[in-house]
Image (cartoon, rainbow, N blue to C red):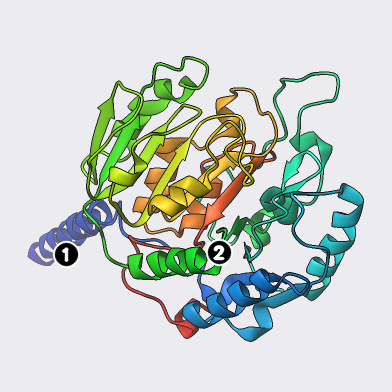
Amino acid sequence: MRKVANNRTRAKISLALGLLALAACVSCPVAAIGPAQLGVLVNLADPHSVAVGQRYLDQRGIPSANRVEVNFKSGTAVLSPGVFEAIKRRIDDLTPAGVQAFAITWTRPYRVGCMSVTTAVAAGYDPAFCHPPDRRCAPTRKLMYFDSQSSAPWTTHGIRPAMVLAGNTLAEVDRLIHRGVQSDGRMPEGVAYLLSTSDSARNVRAVQYGQVFSRVAGRIRVRRIEQDWIRDKSNVLFYFTGTTQVQHLETLRFAPGAVADHLTSAGGKLDGTQQMPVLAWLEAGATGSYGAVTEPCNYPDKFPRPAVLMDHYLNGETLIEAYWKSVASPGQGLFVGEPLARPFGLAPRSNEGDRM
């Protein structure tokens, strides 16, 4: 009987230790896309793209086999679906099987027909990702990758999420890449700012802010503020708002790996409109952002869900994974930033450690 009792005691102790370990690892960094699983798309007709592509391959230690070369007229904002289809076929033909996501090295074109270039590259051109011609405002196609636990989207969902290494100059892109690399494994103690603005049409995400407190409680400082902008803040890690313009960006200091975006109709139009383009976030020091390239109307599913993005990012996923998983209907939205930024990974990764 004593032996049985001892076995039971040891079993209880083992169970207790296992539960403690599980509880301790609720927010442990998870598997994530690494350099060996990232393809780099380079447009040979665009000297800016060629330079960015080589620098990114070098900085991130991405295998040269993952460099995918295309060749098309550069500089225009919009590609026609017909021209894009030929480009997409070449991308599919040349991409190594193990690649799970893409970095796009050109800033323009940022749009394919009615879609963003990032979603067109990721999932192919499909008008279902945009509203029907006879309905200016309508829901659009969703992806199952939303809020998923997959670290291999091509393998599990048949898409390769894409993100643009965007910048008007090579120097701007260099700084962006540097911020992303610098962020790896830093576990920054930044602040998340959730703004409820006076712009009722663009403040629709504010009702989601309560989810942030339930999903990331205790892992980061969160400030919910009812005003149109913040100023003179340091160590900004997340900044979500809804407005056409965001003032006082020059007074902010963003942490390496920071994410910031503003819900509005034309933030993804990188040439600039009467609304602030998302490039302004990157120029101010953010490492990732998101904006619409065609009129999405204010459907929350077409924009990042802050709680989902923050949860996946804080769990150790890369920027490209966390951002993509936060948007249910990404067809009209452009993802920009340094894809492999991973502030909450355990440590900077090597190519060998990331091979599948």
The residue labelled by disc 2 is 169
Towards the viewer: 318 or 354: 318
Q: Which residue is mark 1?
A: 7
Dot 1 falls on a residue whose secondary structure is helix
Residue 307 visible somewhere in the drawing: yes
Residue lying furthest left: 2
Q: Quadrant of the N terminus?
A: bottom left
| Residue 182 in the image, given as x and y percentages of width and height | 34, 69
Relative to 36, is 258 on the left or the right?
Answer: left
How packed is label 2: few (under 14 Cα within 10 Å), some, or many (20 or more)?
A: few
Q: Amino acid at mark 2?
A: Thr
Q: Quadrant of the C terminus?
A: bottom right
Three-letter amino acid code at the position of disc 1? Asn
56 relative to 86, above or below: below
Crowdedness near tag 1: few (<14), some (14–19) or many (≥20) residues, C-alpha within 10 Å:
few
Residue 218 is situated, as x and y percent measured from the top left of the image, at 20, 42
Residue in view at x 77 percent, y 27 percent: 131
Cα separation, mark 2 vs mark 1, equals 67 Å
* Percent of width and height locating residue 271: 64, 46
Are circles 2 and 1 on residues that touch, CB within 8 Å? no
Residue 290 location, quadrant = top right
